């Protein structure tokens, strides 16, 4: 290879990495999979790779330009029964649902989503009527050259307390169930101006949790506070230059993040400024380095306590805030930050990035790996290490999801599956949804995604590990929870096959393990599998049949095996 070609290749590699050193605000503070597995610079600074991605998106849009919006009306009959444990109940109910599934790809817009409203008519077993809204939407609109308006939303059901039961499918009237609503929106800007790459962005997020049925815990176990609602703001900007005039790429960036949560009047406030360089040392390898300053504060007020000093809970299992108490800091760090790393990109199909540095008064490790062996298969791995919370984590997770994916649902419960798989990327929200807790936390973890298709089959796998260390003020009545480490492991699998022009088959399964670190709390493990068959009966009328098994064990205190079945009709308009 000639020196000229080597230099050009190395410069292209450095330009690719320059986007990675942008370290947008969501990647700066977030300890969530999206911050590690997604390209942190994609929303904050353009690069040679950004230009390439735009060209690829343009080609893809020409090939795949589509506007597929499918509203529907659905009627289902569901039976669910305790096969082991529980009260031995057999419940039946009828569901009437309206919804819409959408996949839109145009020259300026991309959107993928599913929204569904259903009313359940309880019929037997003492099951009451219920109204349920669920959905997942992620979209982007190109308002002007380099300027995108982005948004995402999630409505689903989740576990209220990580120490409580995990019924998985949320069918029937189980305990420890919460309705969750989260939305984010904001502009991002990425454009080359002269020989400089300029990027900026802002994101607003809101998350709300409503408790349906509080958790039932083993005797002696103290309940955790359940999240209520929060708002969060993120703003960031960057400017840099690609290799050319200089033998390395450079970038200067800064950002700010703020969250205000209703529970205990919590507040997160963080800001940073940093400079990064990217130095190619070969056509496939480059060294990364950055240094800067951060200032992060997390605080909350005390809960009201009774005569025995025990925190008071309301009917929904939430602490009652003592508004007269001062806000105390649970985390306070300011000073120098740095990181160093390497990126290896032997081909357009493979890339690996690894970093180590100093953040949050501690050593941090982050990285990502992406491999695309063919056009139909994608492997992604992200290692994350940061600060997060339930509200900020959901905003970051939604922002990291792709704008092109195939939204899927559990065929019996109708809930949105927590992992999504697209042609270019994918993501799972299991890490955020496993525990709707109030406390801010320091967390580390890893998440891996595999999506593929072969013939008429399509597959998806999401697997991950997350460790959270709770942050509580030392002088708080809840100080005994400070430093508590909770660990969770999760696995989600899905497969589908088009049997013929009128019918298809789908299978999905999950496995979760939650290792509680609180004193006296037991571990919770759960698993489930579902299968569904659907067939077009006449024109837009489709019939379906599905079955599911779910099981959980609350450390021997509360264990159940639940079987469910469904038959239904759907009419697509």
Image (tube, helix red, strand yellow):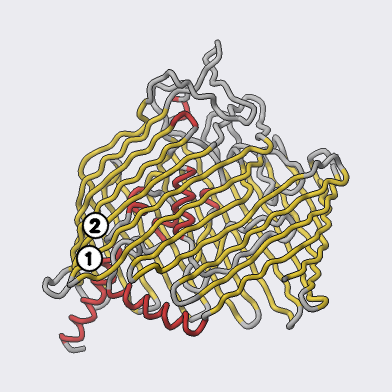
Q: Residue furthest top?
A: 307
Number of residues whose C-alpha sits closer than 10 Å to that of mark 2, classed few (under 14), some (14–19) or many (20 or more): some
Q: Residue furthest bottom?
A: 2
| Residue drawn at the location 43% of the way across and 18% of the way down | 324
The quadrant holding residue 557 is top right
| Residue drawn at the location 30% of the way across and 63% of the way down | 20
Which element is circle 1 on?
strand
Q: Which residue is mark 1?
A: 287
Q: Position of residue 565 (x, y in %)?
A: 81, 57
User: Which sits earlier in the primary sequence, circle 1 or circle 2?
Assistant: 1
The residues bearing labels 1 and 2 have C-alpha atoms spaced at a distance of 8 Å
Q: Position of residue 376 (x, y in %)?
A: 53, 79
Q: Which residue is mark 2?
A: 340
Residues under numbered marks 1 and 2 in contact, where contact means CB atoms less than 8 Å apart: yes
Number of residues whose C-alpha sits closer than 10 Å to that of mark 1, classed few (under 14), some (14–19) or many (20 or more): many
Vertical side of 548 occupied by 47: above or below: below
Q: Of 80 and 259, which appears nearest the observer?
A: 259
| Residue drawn at the location 66% of the way across and 51% of the way down | 133
Vertical side of 487 occupied by 190: above or below: below
Image quadrant where one finds the C terminus = bottom right
Vertical side of 53 occupied by 421: above or below: above
Vertical side of 305 occupied by 403: above or below: below
Q: Position of residue 243 (x, y in %)?
A: 17, 72
Q: Of 32 and 186, which appears nearest the observer?
A: 186
């Amino acid at each position: 290879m000639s020196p000229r070609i080597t230099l050009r290749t190395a410069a292209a590699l450095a330009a690719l990495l320059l986007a990675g050193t942008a370290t947008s605000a969501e990647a700066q503070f977030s300890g969530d999979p999206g911050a590690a597995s997604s390209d942190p610079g994609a929303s904050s600074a353009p690069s040679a790779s950004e230009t390439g991605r735009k060209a690829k998106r343009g080609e893809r849009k020409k090939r795949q330009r589509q506007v597929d919006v499918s509203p529907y009306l659905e009627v289902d009959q569901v039976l669910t029964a305790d096969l082991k444990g529980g009260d031995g109940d057999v419940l039946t109910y009828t569901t009437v649902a309206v919804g819409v599934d959408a996949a839109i790809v145009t020259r300026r817009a991309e959107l993928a989503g599913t929204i569904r409203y259903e009313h359940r008519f309880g019929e037997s077993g003492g099951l009451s009527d219920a109204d349920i809204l669920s959905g997942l939407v992620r979209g982007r609109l190109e308002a002007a050259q380099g300027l995108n308006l982005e948004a995402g939303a999630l409505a689903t059901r989740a576990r209220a307390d990580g120490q409580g039961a995990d019924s998985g499918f949320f069918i029937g009237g189980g305990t420890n169930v919460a309705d969750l609503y989260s939305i984010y929106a904001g502009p991002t800007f990425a454009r080359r101006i002269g020989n400089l790459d300029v990027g900026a962005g802002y994101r607003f997020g809101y998350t709300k949790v409503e408790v349906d049925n509080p958790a039932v815990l083993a005797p002696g176990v103290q309940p955790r506070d359940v999240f209520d609602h929060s708002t969060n703001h993120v703003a960031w900007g960057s400017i840099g230059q690609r290799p050319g005039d200089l033998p390395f790429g450079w970038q200067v960036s800064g950002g700010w993040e703020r969250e205000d949560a209703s529970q205990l009047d919590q507040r997160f406030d963080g800001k940073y400024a940093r400079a990064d360089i990217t130095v190619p040392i070969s056509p496939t390898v480059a060294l990364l380095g950055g240094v800067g300053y951060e200032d992060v504060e997390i605080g909350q007020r005390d809960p009201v306590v009774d005569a025995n000093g025990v925190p008071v809970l309301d009917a929904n299992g939430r602490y009652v805030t003592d508004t007269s108490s001062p806000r105390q800091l649970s985390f306070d760090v300011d000073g120098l930050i740095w990181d160093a790393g390497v990126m290896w990109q032997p081909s357009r199909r493979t890339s690996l990035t690894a970093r180590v540095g100093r953040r949050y008064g501690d050593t941090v490790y982050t990285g990502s790996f992406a491999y695309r062996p063919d056009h139909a298969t994608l492997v992604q791995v992200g290692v994350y290490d940061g600060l997060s919370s339930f509200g900020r984590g959901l905003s970051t997770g939604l922002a990291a999801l792709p704008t092109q994916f195939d939204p899927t649902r559990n065929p019996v419960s109708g809930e949105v599956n927590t992992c999504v798989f697209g042609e270019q990327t994918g993501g799972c929200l299991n890490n955020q949804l496993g525990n709707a807790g109030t406390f801010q936390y320091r967390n580390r973890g890893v998440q891996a995604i595999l999506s593929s298709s072969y013939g008429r089959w399509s597959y998806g796998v999401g697997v991950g590990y997350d460790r959270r260390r709770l942050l509580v003020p030392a002088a708080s009545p809840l100080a005994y929870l400070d430093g508590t480490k909770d660990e969770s492991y999760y696995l989600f699998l899905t497969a589908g096959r088009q049997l013929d022009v009128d019918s298809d088959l789908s299978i999905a399964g999950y496995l979760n393990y939650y290792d509680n670190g609180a004193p006296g709390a037991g571990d919770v493990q759960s698993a489930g599998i579902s299968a569904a068959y659907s067939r077009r009966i006449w024109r837009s009328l489709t019939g379906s049949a599905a079955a599911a098994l779910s099981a959980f064990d609350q450390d021997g205190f509360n264990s159940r095996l639940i079987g469910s079945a469904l038959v239904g009709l759907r009419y697509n308009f």
